[in-house]
Image: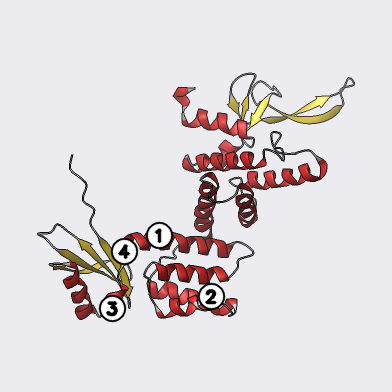
Amino acid sequence: MGTEIKYKILECKFGDKRFKIEEDLPDVGWYLYVYDQKGKCIADHLQNDLETVINFAFEEYKVPMTNWVDSKDISFVQEETNKILAQRVLSHFDSKKLIDWAIMLMGKGFDSESLIILAGLNSDTTEEREQYFWQTIDELGLDINRTDFELIENYAIYVAESVVNKKIAPKDGLTIMQDIVRSTDYSKRYVQFYEIDEDLDYLKYDNHTIFNSGLTLKNADKYITREFELFLETEKYKIDDKTRELAYCKSCDKIEKPKLKNIRNWFGKVKYQTWVCGLCESKSILHFSSQKGKEIILKRKTQPNNV
């Protein structure tokens, strides 16, 4: 089999238009595409080589020759921008991160008046940094059409992947997730990280846990990392809230929503309530909120023929 040919793609935004240069076969040349604000291609031009097409873009559309950036860098910068936008939604955002972001963009070859100014605002106010951040977004034509929910969703996955790939320490990742939990009003997708954090406090001060029976101070990093791994699995398979309410029963080997059962004393008076299997009423259940329960239920739901 022949080697796959990888064609070069350059992009930039200038004025109210977005431009893209795409390499084709050597005997064809290089295409220049012009897009309006709605993303509709309004013109295309074919030139013999890269230098010629860049010169043509300058002569025809006044696109500065230094504005062109590799599309791979644009994708990377877009991801980094989404992370910044997500962090702004969360609490305790340090606006100095906007300066780091600007310096990173310049290192990737991006250039704009506001970007250069932002990179030098070390001693300035958050308001001024924010002003030039948004102006840079506009000048570079970066896509910020994301809801807060989408930004947080993607950022949570980034944090989880960073912990699993050992780019972020487990406890640092857990700390970030606390902001995500609060910002999403304790969503079932993220609340397990709040429960781990609570249990770590209980272990420190009272030597017991409430939510995670297998968690100890010694195995905390391993336990947290495993929770992030399971989180990525639940996101991969788009596990819904109904599934998160289920439990695996060791007695009947079924997965069902558990129910509360009254436990009575010898006189028939209710002594306490406990969760039991919704089918056989056994107390020997593993809820989805536990790591073991999550592992079993995920396996049954995603690999039903292999169990």
Is residue 260 depicted above or below 50 in this figure? Answer: above
Going 51% across and 43% down the picture, which residue do you hit? 232
Residue 61, given in percent of the width and then of the height, sits at: 23, 78
Q: Earlier in the sequence, mark 1 or mark 2?
A: 1
Q: Which is more toward the observer, 201 or 145? A: 201
Distance of label 4 from label 1 (alpha carbons): 10 Å
Classify mark 2: helix, strand or loop. helix
Farthest right residue?
267
Classify mark 4: helix, strand or loop. strand
Q: Which mark is residue 262?
A: none
Q: Earlier in the sequence, mark 4 or mark 1?
A: 4
Q: Nearer the viewer, mark 2 or mark 4?
A: 4
Q: Which residue is mark 3?
A: 64
Is residue 214 depicted above or below 106 in this figure? Answer: above
Q: Which residue is mark 4?
A: 70
Q: Which residue is mark 1?
A: 76
Distance of label 3 from label 2 (alpha carbons): 26 Å
Classify mark 1: helix, strand or loop. helix
Is residue 286 depicted above or below 44 in this figure? Answer: above
Kind of residue at disc 2? Glu
Distance of label 1 from label 2 (alpha carbons): 21 Å
Q: Quadrant of residue 91 in the image?
A: bottom right
Q: Is residue 240 visible?
A: no
Horizontal relation, residue 231 to residue 303: left or right = right
Q: Are discs 3 and 2 less than 8 Å apart at CB? A: no
